[in-house]
Image (tube, helix red, strand yellow):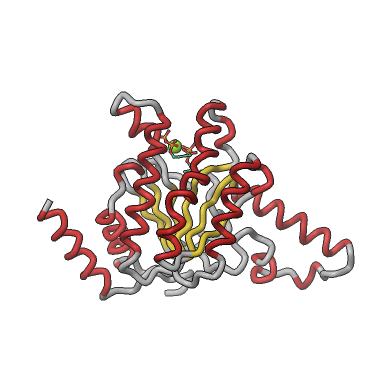
C-alpha cells in the first residue's frame, strides 16, 4: 500500500513537469470481462466501472486537464440484451444522484455527447438535471458520450449543413473544417490530445472519428474496473513522450 502510494506520488510529480493534455478521451472497455473473470454477472462490472470513473476524477484533481470525455454507451450498444441496456440506462441517474455534490465541490461541469432524445425519459431527465446544476462550473468539463456514434454524429452534421444550404443560409463553398465542426456534438470543445482505451482491444469502435485525427492513442491491457490513478498518470507520462508533428517535420 505504502509503495503504491509512493509510486503514484512519484509518477504525479514526474508528469506535472511536462506538457499536459488539455482533453483526454477514454473508451472505458472491459467491464463485462472483468465481471466474468470473477464469476459475477456483467452488471457487476458496470457497477465497478463507476468507481473507476471516480478514481479517474480523483486523479485529475491534481492536474490541469480541462476536458475529460468518457465513452459510456455507443449507438451500437443497443444490440446488447435488454436487461443489460436497461441497467446501463440507470447509471447516469445513479451517477448524478451520487456524485452531484462531488462535482459541485470540485467545480466540474457536466456535458453530454450523443443523441439524447434516443435515451429513455428517466435517463434524459437525470442527465438534464446534472447538466443544469453544474452549468455554472468552470473547472474540468466532464463529458459522457451516451448513445453516441461518430458516424451518426457526422451524418447528422452533414444533414444540418445540407438543410442550411437548401434554405440559402449557407453557401456550400464556405464549408470548411472549422465551420463543419460547429455542427458536431463536440461544438466548442478542443480535439482530444490523448485517447485511452482499456481492455486490450486495439480499436476505436466509432468514438470521435472526426476529432481524433491527430490524437495520441494509448491502449492499455487492463480492464476498465481495474483502472487506477496510477494508470491515468502513466498514460499521461506516455503521452508526454510522444512527438506530435501534425504532418510537419
Ligand atoms: C464497456 O465494457 C462498457 C460499455 C460498452 C457499456 P463492456 O461491457 O464492453 O465490457 P466487455 O468488453 O464486454 O468486457
Ligand atoms: C466501446 O466498447 C463502447 C464503449 C466503451 C461505450 P464496445 O465494447 O461496445 O466495443 P466493441 O464492440 O468491442 O468494438
Ligand atoms: Mg466491450
State how many labels appear.
0
Point 38% across, 51% down: residue: 53
Identity of the residue drawn at 60% across and 69% down: 188
Q: Given the current orientation, which residue lies at the most extreme left position?
A: 2
Relative to 81, say whether 193 is above or below.
below
Say which quarter of the image contains residue 171. Answer: bottom right
* Quadrant in the picture for residue 157: bottom right
Horizontal and vertical percent position of residue 164:
83, 63
The residue shown at (53%, 63%) is 134
Residue 211: image x %, image y %? 55, 60
| Vertical position of residue 109 compared to residue 138: above or below | above
Q: Locate residue 245 relative to residue 117 in the image: left or right.
A: left
Instruction: Relative to 85, say whether 184 is above or below.
Output: below
Q: Is residue 41 left or right of residue 160?
A: left
**Residue placed at 10% from the left, 55% from the top?**
2
Report which quarter residue 174 is drawn in: bottom right
Q: With 13 as the anchor, is 37 left or right in this view?
A: right
Where is residue 65 drawn, in percent x and y?
Answer: 40, 68
Q: Quadrant of the C terminus?
A: bottom left
Percent position of residue 12, x then y = 23, 66
Depth order, front residue of 33/247? 33
Which image quarter has ligand 1? top left
Amino acid at each position: 500500500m505504502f509503495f503504491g502510494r509512493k509510486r503514484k506520488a512519484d509518477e504525479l510529480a514526474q508528469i506535472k513537469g511536462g506538457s499536459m493534455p488539455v482533453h483526454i478521451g477514454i473508451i472505458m472497455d472491459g467491464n463485462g470481462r472483468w465481471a466474468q473473470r470473477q464469476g459475477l454477472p456483467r452488471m457487476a462490472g458496470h457497477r465497478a466501472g463507476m468507481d473507476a470513473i471516480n478514481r479517474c476524477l480523483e486523479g485529475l484533481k491534481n492536474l490541469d486537464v480541462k476536458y475529460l470525455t468518457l465513452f459510456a454507451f455507443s449507438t451500437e450498444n443497443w444490440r446488447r440484451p435488454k436487461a443489460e441496456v436497461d441497467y446501463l440506462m440507470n447509471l447516469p441517474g445513479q451517477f448524478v444522484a451520487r456524485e452531484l455534490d462531488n462535482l459541485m465541490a470540485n467545480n466540474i461541469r457536466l456535458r453530454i455527447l450523443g443523441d439524447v432524445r434516443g435515451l429513455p425519459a428517466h435517463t434524459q431527465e437525470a442527465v438534464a438535471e446534472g447538466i443544469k446544476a453544474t452549468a455554472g462550473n468552470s473547472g474540468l468539463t466532464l463529458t459522457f458520450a451516451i448513445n453516441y456514434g461518430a458516424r451518426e454524429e457526422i451524418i447528422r452534421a452533414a444533414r444540418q449543413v445540407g438543410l442550411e444550404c437548401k434554405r440559402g443560409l449557407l453557401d456550400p463553398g464556405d464549408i470548411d473544417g472549422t465551420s463543419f465542426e460547429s455542427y458536431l456534438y463536440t461544438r466548442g470543445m478542443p480535439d482530444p490530445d490523448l485517447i485511452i482505451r482499456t481492455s486490450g482491444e486495439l480499436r476505436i469502435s466509432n468514438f470521435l472519428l472526426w476529432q481524433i485525427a491527430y490524437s495520441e492513442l494509448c491502449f492499455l491491457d487492463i480492464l476498465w474496473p481495474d483502472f487506477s490513478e496510477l494508470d491515468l498518470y502513466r498514460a499521461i507520462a506516455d503521452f508526454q513522450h510522444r512527438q506530435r508533428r501534425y504532418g510537419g517535420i
